[in-house]
Image (spheres, rainbow, N blue to C red):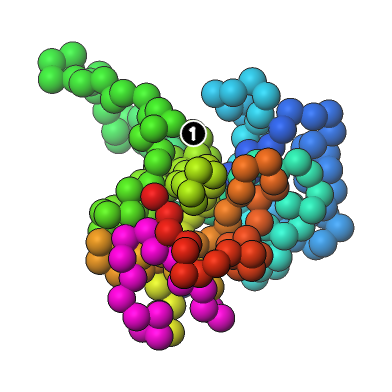
Amino acid sequence: MTMYGTDKRHHTLTVLVENKAGVLARVAGLFSRRGYNIFSLAVAPSDDERFSRITIVVDVESAPLDQIMKQLDKLIPVVSITELDPAMARERELLMATLDGIESGQLEARPQPGEGVSLAPKITAEDARVRWDQPATAVDRQIRACTPSPGAWTTLGEARVKLGPIDPAPEDAASAGTLAPGQVAILRSGVLVGTATTPVRLGDVQPPGKRRMRAADWARGLRQDAAVLS
């Protein structure tokens, strides 16, 4: 399970929102009122014309991640909020250094050869269905790959439930015993789901016809003995 480093100086968030007038101004106003230090803020269209994607880079010390996400969720019609892994995200500093190197002649731009090039197929909704019989690392990567679009999902009975990014199992996971793939355990530290290896802890969950919510809130009405995701 990938863990983020502790030496980050900022959070890089991607926020998928509904296309409504004044969204960018409201986001900027929120950060200004709260005293959050923004490194950059940009808006771009998504694959779906109903939504736009806002990318925000925020100083860690001025804005705790959990607080940012709660404030954004209250302010605007948010579909999903994702923090980019700094080890994987292509940050602007690297791009700028590359362009400067090409301009100065220190780097040489070389076209990609046409031989051996393959086309990556588009991720479909069925590809985004979480397979709990896979190792925890594979489940984590699948959900990250499908966030925010098309959106990872699973089923509880006949209901289709959307999932946000997950976390490694907490320290008290052993108290839940051995969980079969897809089996749900509700602990004080969070909602766990079994995989082929170690359990994972759910983050945000969106039941059908409802807004995104914390997994702990979603699990309050579940019968734990009958809760199995598939």
Compared with 137, 42 (above or below) is: above
Query: In which quarter of the view is residue 22 placed?
Result: top right
Nearer the observer, 87 or 188: 188
Q: Amino acid at mark 1?
A: Pro
* 102 falls in the magenta region: no
Q: Farthest residue in the left direction?
A: 115
Residue shown at 39%/50% (left/top)?
A: 230
* 180 falls in the magenta region: yes
Tell me if 160 is positioned left or right of 199 in this view: right
Tell me if 28 is positioned left or right of 185 in this view: right
Judge the density around disc 1: few (<14), some (14-19), many (≥20) Cα neighbours within 10 Å: some
User: Is residue 103 visible to us here?
Assistant: no
Question: Picture coordinates of residue 138 (x, y %)?
Answer: 29, 53
Magenta residues, start to end: 174-189
Residue shown at 83%/39% (left/top)?
A: 25
Compared with 217, 115 (above or below) is: above
Compared with 130, 173 (above or below) is: below
* Residue position marked by numbered label 1 in the rendering: 150
Question: Picture coordinates of residue 147 (x, y %)?
Answer: 48, 43
Q: How many marks?
A: 1
Nearer the observer, 153 or 38: 153
